[in-house]
Image (tube, rainbow, N blue to C red):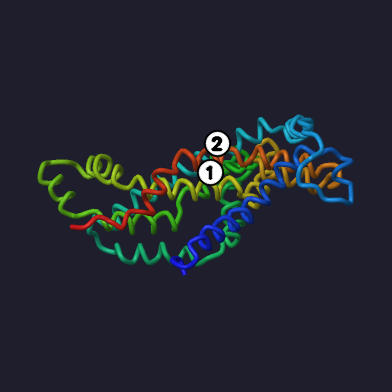
Amino acid sequence: MKKRFPWFSYMVVILGSISMMFPFMDMLFTSFKGPEELSSSTYRLLPKSFDFANYHTAFESLHMGRLFINSLIACFGVTLLVLITSTLSGYALTKLKFKGRNFIFKFTLATMMFPAFLFLIPNFYIMVHTPLVGGNNLLGEGGHGGLASTILALILPFAVSGFGIFLMRQFIMNIPDSLIEAARIDGASEFRIFWQIITPMTMPALATLAIFTFIGQWNELIWSLLIFTVNNNLATLPVGIQMLQSYLDSNSTQAIVCAGLTISIIPIFLVFIFLQKYYVKGINMSGLKE
């Protein structure tokens, strides 16, 4: 097929790319349209004139500065903690021998089978009734929201990822034990082995996990909306855009919402561009051999 029709593969890739890019291009061009174009019965992909007023309105209506800060703090905090906990757990479950190691790993895999919304109420209860936080007493009562009223409520419930532990464990398994044994013979501590040997060799997996975690947390809505009911100052970008889309006239806010969405994908785009070389390297690597 490739020899007889060499152009066919390129056509499939081009058509697939266009179909994937069209929704984003439509969102981008809609953000520059005025109310009269949006109310028109005739669809046009390109706007008649590029009007940046929607972006100015989005910043004022959504308070984009505060939403951006909240989202960035939450996403970077969760991503950093997931990378740390996943790498440490993957190293311990792979290269350290202790009783119950296989059971812990199987239990970790079992947690991936439960839907995320199943933990919403327990996590929220823990955040609200954390002792000695937010005015709570030793019994976790009498306060004004506990940890749920702080930025930590957007970070701590997502600090450990079963998928991240599984991913790092499978990647670390390919690192030869001989490297670790040689370092131990030379007198290196376990932390030094982890930091100077394991961490540099797992950069492709770490980049992949960082991209998945950051994107997933950046788009997280349900938990952020729940925390928003406790403290309105902790709203993130998805919450702000959803509130704007739900409580205002959709005909007049469609372009403003598209402007907010366009701005919101910029950090995701930058993170992927920054980590792209490690991500591609992780795909191309087939694993290290003894």
Q: Earlier in the sequence, mark 2 or mark 1?
A: 2
Name the residue nearer the viewer: 18 or 99: 18
- Seen in the image, is 171 located left or right of residue 149? left
Name the residue nearer the viewer: 193 or 203: 203
| Residue receiving disc 2 | 73
Determine the image quadrant of residue 236. Answer: top right
Q: Residue at x 61, y 48 (%)?
A: 219
Res. 195 in view: yes
Res. 135 in view: no
| Residue receiving disc 1 | 155
- Seen in the image, is 111 located left or right of residue 15? left
Question: Can you name the residue that lies furthest to the bottom here?
Answer: 1
Kindly identify the amino acid type of the residue bearing the numbered disc 1. Ile
Residue 43: image location, x then y, percent: 82, 50
Kindly identify the amino acid type of the residue bearing the numbered disc 2. Ile
- Seen in the image, is 174 located left or right of residue 241? left
Q: Is residue 182 above or below residue 16?
A: above
Q: Residue at x 77, y 37 (%)?
A: 32
* Callout 2 secondary element: helix
* Quadrant position of the C terminus in the picture: bottom left
Residue 140: image location, x then y, percent: 57, 46
